[in-house]
Image (tube, helix red, strand yellow):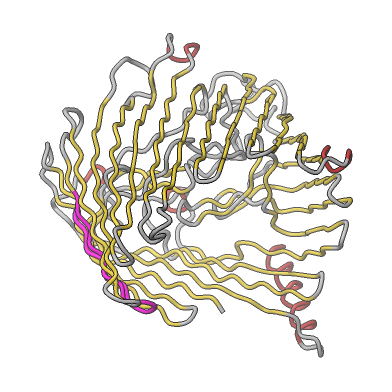
Amino acid sequence: MKRVIFAGCVLGMVGTLYAQSDKGTLMGSLESNNIYYVKDNKLDPSSSANPDDHFGSNSYLKLDYTKGRFSAGVQLEGFLPPLQGYDYATYGNGKRALLGSKYVQWEDDYFGFRVGDIFEQYGSGLIFRSYEDRTLGFNNSIEGVQGHYSYKDYVTLKALYGRPRLYLDYADSYVRGGNLNLSVSDIVGWRDFRFNVEGSYVNRYEALKDDPAFVDRLTTSNLDMYSVGGSLNWNGLDARVEYVDKGKDLPTEASASMVKGKAILAELGYAYKSFSVLATYRKLEHMNTMLSLKGKGAGNVLNYLPALTRQYTYMLANLNPYQVNAEGESGGQADIYYSYRPASDRSKYWNFHANLSMYYSDKNLTKESRLLWRDINADIEHRWNKNWKTSVLVSVQEWSPTHGMDDKTYASNIFVVDNTYKFNRKMALRVELQYLYSQDYEKDWMAALAEFSVAPRWSITVSDMYNNGSTKVHYYNASASYTLKGTRVQLGYGRNRAGYVCSGGVCRYTPAYTGANLVVTSTF
């Protein structure tokens, strides 16, 4: 009821301001993802989605109003019922339409404040990030109040307080925090050398110390987390480091006792003309931080711990993505890029890229440090002429199916050829051919995709991913999309494999399903 009243106030303010002579700007967006599930005897019933009414729908309507330094907005959401594979569907919420978010905000030259639902990140997100990702079904915004103050480029101070959103409701916990960023180089007057320092504090309070389910496990209702870090940029060199100290917490809702945690993140990069290199190292110990100790699922998270590995868009390269072991892992990745463009013909270029990522478990959790993930990959992109471009990728992946609990690992060798040919300024055809060779798990896979586009309106895609190893199952898909101004409509049908769907290095598990999919997106 409070959210409905707040939304009414927001819409009333927007209507009043919009009716004035200087109407300001009103913007909106609509997104609706709908699937009709059909029975498919080729899929394993134990890992397949078979809802009773065969239908799922996730829809979002967002409205934002801006006038000068003032802005306000609301987001209406409908899950009628939620799509399978989202925690919305398994959290006992059923069919629901709700006010998902609302806010009013004021921004001045030096300060600003926001009341309503807050999206924010401190540092790299190791101790706190509130964000929305519709692909994952995540929205852990903080309903409360936020303020910030900035003085020139010297200092920025932020603070917030509120309760976090947990799926379609709000948790019975409260989050408060602050972040301070100092630009030392601006304060001192350095021009060619950039140096910043940053510190953050976040507290989660949840009154469960006397709860019968937690009385023997909790020694405090407060969780305190601190982070400190710095970054510098000089003459093509970029470096960043962050250290996190986490107080006692239950790593999972089933943990027997509270433990302390910590994290280290370090990044080093260098760029010179068409060459660049970037290396990242991260170590995590008991860094899974829940919004609520009573919550479950992948969306019950207060901080942001993405997999720092190469993020693929190719089907077979992303068949078994790395899952972060927040309780204990160490490792990192390195990237090398080089681009060559001959002066005689700038349209004929070569792009070279190599990547290595490797992670090991914490021996305190798995008795000895074991390999969790390794990916050695390289790709070359070459434009033959103004119309034809080719990319070739090779990836050798090795991963632990038990997250390091034993020495067993699976290996996959993946090969991809991707060709794009432009017939003219509007029509283009892209074709992917992929193969995965493995002697483990489901053994060999092959995949192909063809996409024909007529800019700026039409796009037609057909693909098939076939396991020619142990299951002999085809995962076929076909879709067509049409775009007119700010509206895009896509209709597709196909069979989808059970596995992980990832966005930004964070993943959720989705069951296998076969069905028709209608997606509508529009901005206005």
The residue that appears at 23% across and 65% down in the rendered structure is 478
Residue 492 visible in the shown view: no
Check the image and report above or below for 372 versus 155. Answer: above
- Which of 293 and 243 lies nearest the eye of the viewer? 243
- In which quarter of the view is residue 224 placed? top right
The residue that appears at 39% across and 36% down in the rendered structure is 354
- In which quarter of the view is residue 377 placed? top left
Question: Where does the image place residue 481, in percent across and percent down from the top left?
Answer: 33, 73
- Which of 110 and 477 lies nearest the eye of the viewer? 110
Question: Where does the image place residue 453, in percent across and percent down from the top left?
Answer: 30, 72
Please tell me whether residue 32 belongs to the stretch shown in magenta: no
Relative placement, left or right, of 218 versus 133 is right
Residue furthest to the top: 367
Check the image and report above or below for 158 versus 251. Answer: below
Relative placement, left or right, of 21 versus 93 is right
Secondary structure mostly taken by the magenta-highlighted segment of the chain: strand
The residue that appears at 80% across and 44% down in the rendered structure is 191
- Which of 159 and 448 lies nearest the eye of the viewer? 448
Q: Quadrant of the N terminus?
A: bottom right
Q: Give the range drawn in magenta.
A: 447-464
Residue 280 visible in the shown view: yes
